[in-house]
Structures are given as C-alpha cells and as structure tokens.
Image (cartoon, rainbow, N blue to C red):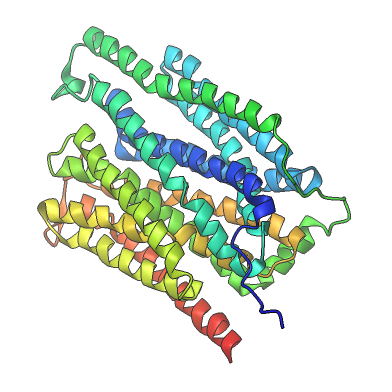
Amino acid sequence: MNKTQAAPVVPKKLLLPFILVTSLFALWGFANAVTDPMVQAFKKVLELSNSQAAWVQMAFYGGYFCMALPAALFVRKFSYKSGVLVGLTLYAGGALLFYPAATTGLFWFFCLGLYILTFGLAFLETTANPYIMAMGDQKSATQRLNLAQAFNPVGLIVGLLVAKFFVLDLLQSDDVENFSALPEAQKLLIKSADLMVIRNPYVILGLVVLAILVLIAVNKMPQAKGDGSIPSIKDTFSELFQNKKYALGVFSLVLYMGAQIGCWTYIYQYAEAKGISSSTAANYQLVAFILFTVGRAIGTYMLKFMSSGKLLFCFSGLGGLFALGAVILEGHAGLYSLVLVSLFLSVMFPTIYGIALEGLKEDQAKIGAAGLVMAIVGGALLPKLQGMIIDFGGVGVNDITVLGLSEMNLSFLLPVSCFTIIAIYGIWIHRKHNIAETL
C-alpha cells in the first residue's frame, strides 16, 4: 500500500526556473531600498519640504499603479519570459535616465526616471508573483511565495548599504549645518556635486540590470502563454471584486504598502527629530531590514503550523503595537520601536497576496495579480499624506506639539490605523475560510 507524501514546496523539475524568477525579488528589493533614502537626500540637496520630497515616492509607486494592468495584459497574451524581459528593459532605461537628470538638476527629471523604472518593476512583480505561486501544488502556493519573497530583503539590505555608503555618506549638503543660508554660488557647487552622487548608483544599477536581461534572455525556462480565448477585462474584474477575499485583499495591500513605506521612508525624518544625521539613521534602517529578513524566515516557517489568516492577524497586530510605540514614546525608545515594526512587516505582503489569489483560475489570477500590484500605489498616496501631516506646522520635523507629541510622532498614527484594519482582515480570513474548511 502506497503512502501519500506531501508535495514538495518546489518540484525538482521547476527548481531552476524558481531560482531565476526568485532572483528578481532581490532586484526590485534593491530598487525599493536605494530609493527610500532619496526622499531625505533630495529634501536636503534641492531644499524641498517633506511633502515636496514625497513626490519621489509618488513617482516610484505611482509607476506600479499605471503599468500593472498593461503588464498583466501583455503577460496574458505573450509569456512570462517576455514580461520579464520587457520589465528589465524598462527598469534599466529608467535608472539610466538619472544621468541626464543629474546634468540638468531638475527634480521632475529624476521623478520621471523613477516613474519609468517602476514601469519595469510593475512588469516584474506582475509576472513573478503568480508565476512562483503556479510552480507546484496550490496548497503550498502561499508558502512558496513567502520562500521566494524571503530573498527580497537581500536586495533591500544591499540597496540600503549602497544608499548609505555611496550616497548619504558622500552628500556635502548634509554636512553643512545651514545649507540654505550659504551664498548661491557655493550652494550651486555643492548641489551639482551632490546630484552626481545621487546619480551614480542608479546608472550603475541600470548597467547591471542590462547584464541580467542578457542572462535571462539566453536561458530557457518553462512558461505559460495565453491563447487569446479569455474573458474580457470588465468581466474578469467584475468576478474578482465579487470575491470578498480578493477585494478586501487589494484594500489591505493598499494599506500595507502605505504603512511599510511610511515606516521606512520617514525613519530618516524621525531620526532627524532626535538630532540624528541621515547617515546614522541609515544604520537604524539597516537593522530594520535585517529584522525584516529574519521575520520573513520566521513567518514562512510558522505557515507550516498556522493558517495564513491567523499569521497575518498576529503580525499586523504586533506591527501596529510597535508603530504606536513610535507615536507615544520619547527619545530613542520611539526610534527603537519604529525599527521593530519591520520584524512584523516581513510576511504581510506575500501573505495578503497569497490569500487574495488563492483558488482563482489561471486567467483570473493573472488579472488579479495586476490588481494587487496596482495596490502598491498605497506606497505613493499614504506616505504623501503622512508628509503633509509632518509639514502641518512647517517644513521642519518638530514645529508643533499636540498633547505633548510632535507632528512627527503623530504622523505615525496613520500606519497604526493601517495595521489595525489589516489585522481585522486577517482574523476574518481565518474565521471565515480556514476554520470553515476544517469543519
């Protein structure tokens, strides 16, 4: 009598494609991490307010929103590999635009480069996430996606180290106590030098991405291809949004991205409010990314024993608790609490993503994946709103206090609210779906 064995998370025959696609997770992690400190860098170099500097994130995450659906349609009609190659081309093109942007010194030109770069990331994420989920048994799809996403923090850590040592540590404008008060001629020289410092990592990144593009182009890997016999987009989205698990998953992902990018981007301004330099603040973000990596490993392991909904509830609840610590704690304690939020951010994206796509047909999953990638726009909208809260009393970070709390601290009530709603979604999923399946 044959004993039934549990299917492996990744079948042996799909191991090479899994590794190749998983490498892309690190690649977009790098882009995310190297961009977060740029909000503070542009604020210093170009003398912007917190709200104006937040246009960096608006451009970066807005690109996801605009290109996610076209990317899904492209992949549905052609192939996964074609989608990856187009994504890498756009990624490299956007990064290389930083060269002329630095020459002109125009903020909007840098934002345009980031916008196009994230067109490429939208292609890569729309392609890679559902592809990873399809590489094996559907019962292990969320666990497999968490495994692939575990390599995303590797890119985050490398990106942050590049931002710290090759950008923040080299910015002359950050070393001047009152940069705005300098004579215009001296300020122009410093500004030109600093823009070149910001430019270099992106130009090198663009060249590296082109090399990876060539590597993937010459390798063979299995891939699904659409045959054209598919329902209309309108019908597909209509069906998807009648599925409450999917629709609420998209909303939860909007909130998650807003909370994540807010906690990562404004760690620099939070540190500034405590008298800590941007370069030193990068060390705190590095610890946050290491905790993020550790959390991914812990969360992926816990999925063996815990339902995805319950895991999401626990991690988002604890994330909200530490975000609240960043609001109410004074001094370095608040900063430590903000850093610890990343431990619980770790598994939330792939877990929400996996829950929302679970059980969908292949064609629905491809369009559904686009809806989820479009939800990344939360990383543009909510940090912009948080920047406006920080600027409420002026362009500084400690202009006013309410009930003894600075506007900087109070701005983190926005992530706290996001985590609370996500926790409610997680426990709803656990009670309605996971418990129901065991009855």
Q: Is residue 386 visible?
A: no
Name the residue nearer the viewer: 406 or 208: 208
| 306 lies left or right of 320 | right
Name the residue nearer the viewer: 260 or 143: 143
Q: Residue furthest bottom?
A: 439
Image quadrant holding the N terminus, namely bottom right
Name the residue nearer the viewer: 21 or 332: 21
| 233 lies left or right of 399 | right
Position of 193 relative to 173 (above/below): above
Q: Residue furthest front?
A: 1
Position of 161 relative to 408 (above/below): above
Q: Residue at x 55, y 81 (%)?
A: 434
Image quadrant holding the C terminus, namely bottom right
| 160 lies left or right of 186 | right
Res 245 → quadrant: bottom right
Q: Residue at x 36, y 65 (%)?
A: 417
Q: Residue 436 in the image: x percent, y percent?
A: 58, 87
Res 190 → quadrant: top left
Q: Residue at x 79, y 42 (%)?
A: 78
Q: Residue 144 in the image: x percent, y percent?
A: 56, 59
Q: Residue at x 10, y 52 (%)?
A: 331
